[in-house]
Amino acid sequence: MNNKRYLSLILILGSLTALGPFSIDMYLPAFPVIAKDLNTSTEQVAISLSSFFIGISLGQLLYGPLLDRFGRKKPLCIGLVLYILASLGCVFVTSLNQLIILRAVQALGSCAAAVASVAMVRDLFPVKDSAKVFALLMLVVGVSPMLAPTAGSYVTILFGWHAIFIALIALGVLNLLASIFWLPEKYQADPNISLMPAPIIKTFLSVIAEPYFYTYALTGAMAFSGLFAYVAGSPVVFMEVFEVSTELYGWIFAILSIGLISSSQINSALVKRYKSEQIVFAALSIQLVLTLCFCAGAYFNLLNLYETIALLFLFLCCLGFINPNTSALSLSPFKKNAGSASALMGAIQMGIGALASSLLGMFETKSAFPMVAVMAGSTIIAMIILLMGRMKLSKTIA
């Protein structure tokens, strides 16, 4: 594969992978405006974020078998059409309940792009390059949290929050055209794969039974759920607790994203010298110490705006090392069922992420502590899962 073709595939797959994050991040600065327009609170608007996470989690379980049965492109294109239609519906909502429902439908569409892009990494690139490709995809994905909130803040100020969903419609259309005309179909569709519930469940159970999968998919999902807590909690923390403006919130979100991007690219160099398993353990250990210190500082109200930004930056750096390697390790045993495996991995990640973001609603206090407490708790559980999984893997190899 020549460099030009390699780069074009990375850009298309990265754009597909970025569709979900862009749909999440772009409307975050508009939370207070949406709340005012729909006669509700900022915390209630955040429920539409949780519904998106739930929709994308459940949808991935649907698209996994479809991608293995019919190939990658047909389900992908159908999902993108659904995404475009749901985004159009969001433009015309008049109540919070309508927004919550349409965001879930929008997620069902976008998750086709998420599952297909991950599965196609396994189709289009050799296993030994998987961690590198996932890191490159994270570079492309990382642009979305840099651009989306900042762009969303200015779009909201200039044109109103409805225009954000018009922009998402345009992004969906571009992805649909790129998928139709420039994305190759290397996977051979397998008509023998059943779409009946029993065989699908059997396939998912066979995936879950793989030690590498359940160890690193669960570890990665728990560690990454801290990001969902950060995304859901940051509008309240920055715009209500620290009282920053809508524009400044967008820029803070963009600056913090640099941590995730830069560490994921450093990871591309590290995987040449160290095993992915070693990188995951080291990064998660640092994340554990960091979040415990962060949690103590937030609980005793010792942190100012700049210290909070610095600690969040370091937290995102850790995720930039963890996520590409846990993704590659989770999918490494699979070839035939790569679509189902990637779907299940994504569903687990989004499902746990939805739970993490919804936990913030249990706290009534206006402080950074609820967000940080969920981040710390998810990291602790991730480390426990990793240590137990490594013990199981060592016994299996022995």
Image (cartoon, rainbow, N blue to C red):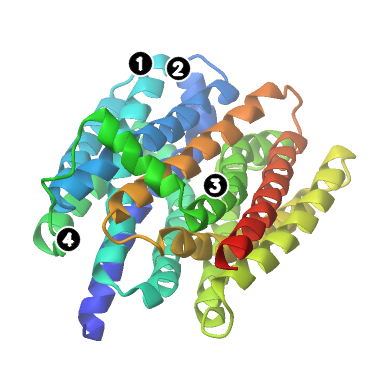
Local secondary structure at mark 2: loop
Residue type for callout 2? Leu
The reply, left or right, for residue 100 in relation to residue 36 is left
Horizontal and vertical percent for residue 310? 73, 59
The reply, left or right, for residue 291 in relation to residue 271 is right
- Which residue position is annotated with label 1? 94
Horizontal and vertical percent for residue 36? 51, 20
Q: Are marks 1 and 2 in contact (CB under 8 Å)?
A: yes
The reply, left or right, for residue 145 in relation to residue 41 is left
Residue type for callout 3? Glu
- In this rendering, the answer to whether 169 lies above or below 294 is above
Residue occupying image coordinates x 73% and y 35%: 241
- For marks 3 and 1, the one nearer the N-term is 1
- Which residue position is annotated with label 3? 247
- For marks 2 and 3, the one nearer the N-term is 2
Residue type for callout 1? Thr
Residue 117's quadrant in the figure? Answer: bottom left
Q: Nearer the viewer, residue 153 or 99?
A: 99
